[in-house]
Image (cartoon, rainbow, N blue to C red):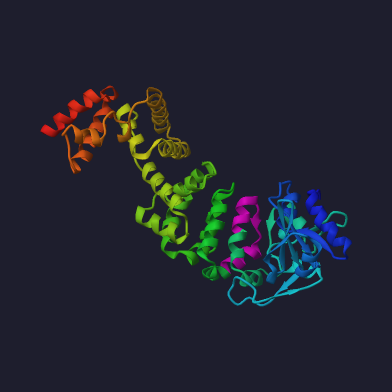
Amino acid sequence: MNLPAKVSEIITVLNDNGYEAFVVGGCVRDTLMSRIPGDFDITTSATPAEVKLLFKRTVDTGVAHGTVTVLLGRSPFEVTTFRQDGDYFDHRRPSNVTFTTSLQDDLSRRDFTMNAIACHPTAGYIDPFGGREDIVSCCIRCVGEPSKRFGEDALRMLRAVRFSGQLGFEIESATLAAITENAPTLAHVSAERVRIELAKLLISDGSDKFADLLSTGLWEAFDPISLPYFAAHFESLRKPIAMCDKTLHNRLALLLMHMDDTEIVRILKLLTFDNKTMKAVRILVSGINQEYPCDPYSVRKALGEFGTDFFNNIIYLKEVIASHNGNTAVLDNLTAIRRQVEQIHKDKDAYTISALAINGNTLKDLGLAQGEQIGKTLDFLLDEVCRDPSLNTLEHLTALSRSFASN
């Protein structure tokens, strides 16, 4: 395994001082799959205190659980002591951890065989549970007894489904059966963690594995209220979602496109999504459920309602849906709308109140409108300019304002 120089340096320092040290987990799995690892985790027989003595710059990121972050230059590397976990009482975290000098003990506590492989620059791979074979077979299998692994940490069930989507692996039968058996314990996992795993799944190549959340009972354990919606709609949505670009708010909008706005707000809040994501999803769902003629007036009005970025995004999502449905008439209309958008921007047509050649202060100074009437007058003027962009001059808008005021 070709390790970055700084990772090799940490391992060498630990080895030269009499300690075992290996890279472990996701970085090993990704390397075996010819993927570029996002980071490198190091496991060692050295205790946190011993690690801190060997390196000048360290951060106590999780000393109680054996983890010290070693800083080499500006690069952080997590170094964790071999450990065994105590009993789990909350289906999430061990009540205590015990440091050990056995790599085998450390690997045996991990979730899946593909994540329970260690590697040393010269000693090679240490793979006591057949992780490399499962990677070749594209198989997600628990280390040891699946029900025990999921009973310890319920989040592992979500991780299994998420890895299945991200890596294109299948969950082996005993592991899948244990997920179904233990699904109710997902209630012990925070909504934030559910959101993180769901987001990773949705933007993966295997977003259709969301179906496994439904079939195993995991989603019912998390949010039984929305289960009927997904049971009714996901099958028809899985392909459009997979066809869509890997943008979270786009895929969320497709996933929730048949849901009413009140329920969208409820479920996104339950999942602890931020306000920006919630706003984007609500706008996109509203937009893709509307029909848009391709005439210039209608397109200007839509641009004014949604803004250019959102409207272009809405048109894109409608194209995805129409492509999936094979609806060439809709696709032709959407192509015509895109041409209109380009022409509107080329001609610098006004489609927002701020782009009008007159403003509220001018209307007030001219005595043409006061108070609430200002807003109504500007809305009227904008509608007229959307119909005929040539009217967007101070002279024309002043005359139109006088006419509007007299009526």
Q: How many labels does the image show?
A: 0
Measured as percent of width and height from the top left, residue 137 is found at 72, 53
Measured as percent of width and height from the top left, residue 99 is found at 76, 73
**What is the residue that sits farthest to the front in this orientation?**
365
Q: Is residue 341 shown left or right of residue 31?
A: left
**Compared with residue 147, is residue 284 higher up or lower down, i.e. above or below?**
above
391 and 55: which is toward the camera: 55
Question: What is the magenta range?
Answer: 161-181
180 and 346: which is toward the camera: 346
| Main SS category, magenta section | helix
**Compared with residue 99, is residue 168 higher up or lower down, i.e. above or below?**
above
Find out whether residue 10 is within the magenta segment. no
Query: Residue at the spot x=49%, y=47% of the render?
Result: 251
Query: Residue at the spot x=34%, y=38% of the render?
Result: 291
Query: Residue at the spot x=45%, y=35% of the render?
Result: 326
Q: Can residue 167 be seen in this view?
A: yes
184 and 154: which is toward the camera: 154
Q: Is residue 352 visible?
A: no
Measured as percent of width and height from the top left, residue 68 is found at 72, 64
**What is the residue that sits farthest to the left in this orientation?**
406
Q: Is residue 104 shown left or right of residue 208?
A: right
Image quadrant in which the C terminus is located: top left
165 and 354: which is toward the camera: 354
**Compared with residue 370, is residue 206 higher up or lower down, i.e. above or below?**
below
**Picture quarter containing residue 370?**
top left
